[in-house]
Image (spheres, rainbow, N blue to C red):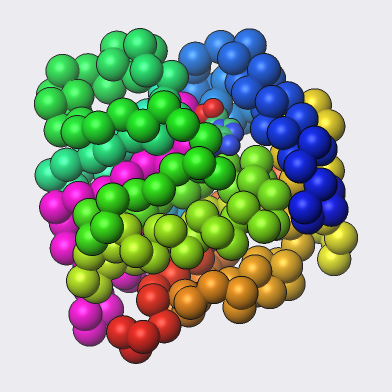
Amino acid sequence: MMEEGNEENTEEFYKKAMVYWSEIPPTIDGMLGGFGHISQIDIHGSRQFLRLIFQLKEPPGKSSVVDCGAGIGRITKHLLSHIFDNIDLNQAFVDQAKDYLGPAVYKKIGTLYNVGLQDFTPENDKYDVIWCQWVLGHLTDADFVKFLERCRSGLKKNGIIVLKENIASSKEVEVDKKDSSVTRPFHLYMELFQRTNLRCIRKIKQNNFPKGLYTVYMFALRPKDIL
Ligand SMILES: C[S@@+](CC[C@H](N)C(=O)[O-])C[C@H]1O[C@@H](n2cnc3c(N)ncnc32)[C@H](O)[C@@H]1O
């Protein structure tokens, strides 16, 4: 991982990812690096995780969600649009998302934020759920922490941030120079959460992915002061 404060490297890290994603076909397979066939299992696991979240004593509302690093809107279409009334998209493949989502889902889309998460500031008190999946490896550790803190301010009462990410197979960060991302080990997630004013209230491993893929965890984070 790059050293914090090394701005030139950081800029390069983000630029390379942008170039990488600009050349990827806007399909499920493109979004999932050739593993489009796991999408249904993924969505099923996420739905179960959300069910758990809605069973909390003080569950989030179902009016407003943002899909961060949305791509063509795979999660929006198959999961979020079935639950939430209004969906904002961050860093979507805008034209393709419109076609892919279809008119019924597209009606629920509010704002499209075409900006990297390192520069994305959710409006205060806007979201019941902030969904970040398979995108946070594109942020440096420092930006990851700052982004989560901004998300905290973007949550409505009882709001939740969900992260769903690959976990490194060893205790070390794995760097992918091709798409300019990192895969973090589990302990690093815990350490980074500690640097925020958020508490991880649920963490669950995704089941039933084919062997050979990274372990994937879902984390639910909530502001410390409301617990
Ligand atoms: C692996 S795809 C996942 C897409 C979607 N979350 C899903 O699970 O179907 C990664 C997405 O992150 C986006 N992305 C890459 N770097 C980003 C950044 N710095 N901020 C926001 N999105 C980013 C890419 O454009 C791409 O759509």
Q: Position of residue 87 (x, y in %)?
A: 23, 40
Quadrant containing the C terminus in the rendered view: bottom left
Q: Quadrant of residue 88?
A: top left
Figure quarter occupied by ligand 1: top right
Q: Is residue 137 visible?
A: yes
Picture quarter containing residue 22?
Answer: top right
Q: Is residue 209 above or below residue 21?
A: below
Q: Percent x, y for residue 92?
A: 42, 26
Question: Which residues make up the magenta segment?
Answer: 49-71
- Residue occupying the point 21% across, 71% down: 157
Q: Observer-nearest residue: 150 or 216?
A: 150
Q: Front-most of 42 and 109?
A: 109
Front residue of this view, candidates 179 and 105: 179
- Residue 96 placement, left or right of 171: left
Residue at the location (44% across, 54% down)?
45
In the rendered view, does 94 fall on the left or right side of 139? Answer: left
